[in-house]
């Protein structure tokens, strides 16, 4: 890549983002003048202590929330100019979300959980199953677990199923908010190995964490404190 890589249009480009929440209690200015870029194929960690604004930022990056001011260009598109339908489409097809608490449906099988994001796509069940199997292979979940209910799995397996669900629409970007926060360190490292594997396959990964040993797995670390970018070093 070299020069071509460094001059390519970033996949994420946020400029001077502020987020101010209004409530009866008054205004809460949570994000202050946040600017950074993420290149296609990068694995970036955003680290900061609890309450520093990481999830607020992730909600904006994931088009679940809009900034009070500032610009967000996602794959070159100005997110503020998209209609609600277009935003829903971006969330469903360009971004895969992974959360600390997995958010799986416990009584459903692994395969059905991973197929859920495809429920609204007009393709035959067999095709949807094939896509789900492909995603589960990418996270190395053993084949004999595909028909297990998700509440029969270990925490690390649950998170890998959740990552497979995030992958099933083949999104360009994976946004993960404290994905190892409910896992012990050994299991957490298996999940981090999964992110490395996805990066090798060309996915762009933004991983949010308060844990410096988790952040150290990324190519680059952006530090946020009190809603401000404190440091964004490049390894
Ligand atoms: N909808 C909201 N209204 C008001 N304050 C909020 C809202 N969402 C988050 N906050 C506040 O923003 C701050 C940062 O929260 P958050 O982004 O969840 O931090 P982190 O994920 O780093 O722990 C916290 O003080 C939180 O109370
Ligand atoms: Mg958070």
Image: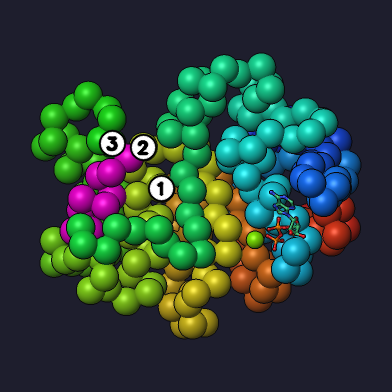
Pick whichever of labels 3 and 1 is earlier in the sequence: 3
Q: Ligand 2 falls in which quarter? A: bottom right
Closest to the observer: 25 or 176? 25
* Residue 51 - label: none
* Magenta range: 109-117
Query: Residue 143's spot in the image, x, y percent?
Result: 17, 63
Q: CA distance from mark 1 to mark 2?
A: 7 Å
Location of mark 3 (residue): 118
Question: Mark 3 falls on what kind of element?
Answer: helix
Q: To which residue does mark 1 refer?
A: 166
| 235 lies above or below 122 | below
What distance separates the C-alpha of mark 3 from that of mark 1? 11 Å
Q: Are marks 2 and 3 in contact (CB under 8 Å)?
A: yes
Residue appearing at x 82%, y 51% in the figure: 25
Residue 176 position within the rendered picture, expressed as x and y whole percent measured from the top left: 54, 55
Quarter location, residue 8: top right
Q: Mark 2 highlights which residue?
A: 169
The quarter in which the N terminus is drawn is top right
Q: Quadrant of residue 204?
A: top right
Residue 114 picture location, percent across and down? 28, 50
Where disc 2 sits, the SS reads loop
């Amino acid at each position: 890549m070299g020069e071509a890589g460094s001059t390519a249009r970033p996949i994420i480009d946020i400029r001077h983002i502020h987020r101010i929440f209004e409530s009866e209690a008054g205004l809460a200015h949570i994000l202050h003048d946040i600017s950074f870029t993420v290149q296609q194929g990068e694995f970036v960690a955003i680290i900061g202590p609890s309450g520093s604004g990481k999830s607020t930022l992730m909600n904006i990056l994931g088009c679940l929330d809009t900034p009070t001011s500032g610009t967000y260009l996602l794959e070159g598109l100005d997110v503020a100019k998209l209609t609600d339908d277009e935003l829903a489409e971006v969330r469903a097809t360009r971004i895969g979300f992974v959360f600390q608490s997995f958010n799986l449906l416990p009584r459903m099988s692994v395969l059905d959980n991973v197929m859920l994001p495809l429920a609204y796509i007009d393709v035959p069940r067999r095709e949807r199953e094939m896509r789900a199997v492909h995603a589960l292979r990418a996270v190395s979940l053993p084949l004999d677990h595909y028909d297990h209910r998700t509440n029969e799995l270990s925490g690390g397996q649950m998170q890998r199923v959740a990552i497979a669900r995030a992958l099933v629409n083949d999104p360009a970007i994976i946004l993960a908010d404290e994905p190892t926060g409910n896992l012990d360190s050994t299991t957490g490292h298996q999940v981090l190995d999964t992110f490395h594997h996805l990066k090798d396959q060309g996915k762009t990964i933004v991983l949010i964490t308060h844990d410096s040993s988790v952040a150290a797995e990324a190519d680059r670390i952006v530090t946020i404190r009190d809603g401000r970018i404190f440091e964004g070093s490049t390894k």
